[in-house]
Amino acid sequence: MKDDVTAQIIETHRDVKWICRTLEEMKETDADFEGRIRNLEGWRAEKAGAEKRTGGIVAGVSGIVGALAAWAVQWLGMG
């Protein structure tokens, strides 16, 4: 009877060690995964910022081209 209890305690101790090791591995994997997600979020934010800047530049250039076209039409006497 005493041997059965000792065997159960040893087996439980092994299970607890295995569970602890597995949890540590999961934490490391989660930390790596979270780092990769943060990198992707940063990349998306940079891309969104670049798109906004590009949109502003395009709007500015379009305004200038429109003004030049209007000036050219007036200068040629077509307007």
Image (cartoon, rainbow, N blue to C red):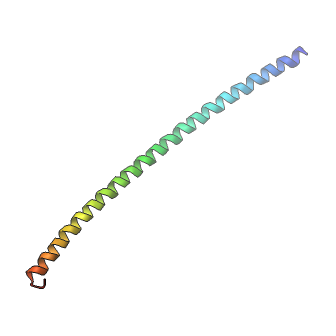
Q: Look at 45% across and 43% down and name the residue there.
A: 38
- Placement of 30 over or under 65, stated as above or below: above
Q: Look at 36% across and 51% down and name the residue there.
A: 46
Of all residues, the one furthest to the front in this rendering is 79
Q: Quadrant of residue 70?
A: bottom left
- Placement of 69 over or under 6, stated as above or below: below
Q: Position of residue 71 (x, y in %)?
A: 12, 75
Of all residues, the one furthest to the top in this rendering is 2
> In the image, 33: left or right of 55?
right
Q: Look at 22% across and 63% down and name the residue there.
A: 60
Q: Position of residue 61 (x, y in %)?
A: 22, 66
- Placement of 25 over or under 69, stated as above or below: above
> In the image, 34: left or right of 7?
left
Of all residues, the one furthest to the right in this rendering is 1
Q: Position of residue 54 (x, y in %)?
A: 29, 60
Front residue of 4 and 67: 67
Q: Quadrant of the C terminus?
A: bottom left
> In the image, 27: left or right of 55?
right
Q: Quadrant of residue 23?
A: top right
Q: Look at 61% across and 34% down and name the residue there.
A: 25
Q: How many marks?
A: 0
Q: Position of residue 44 (x, y in %)?
A: 41, 52
> In the image, 69: left or right of 13?
left
Q: Quadrant of the N terminus?
A: top right
- Placement of 51 over or under 38, stated as above or below: below
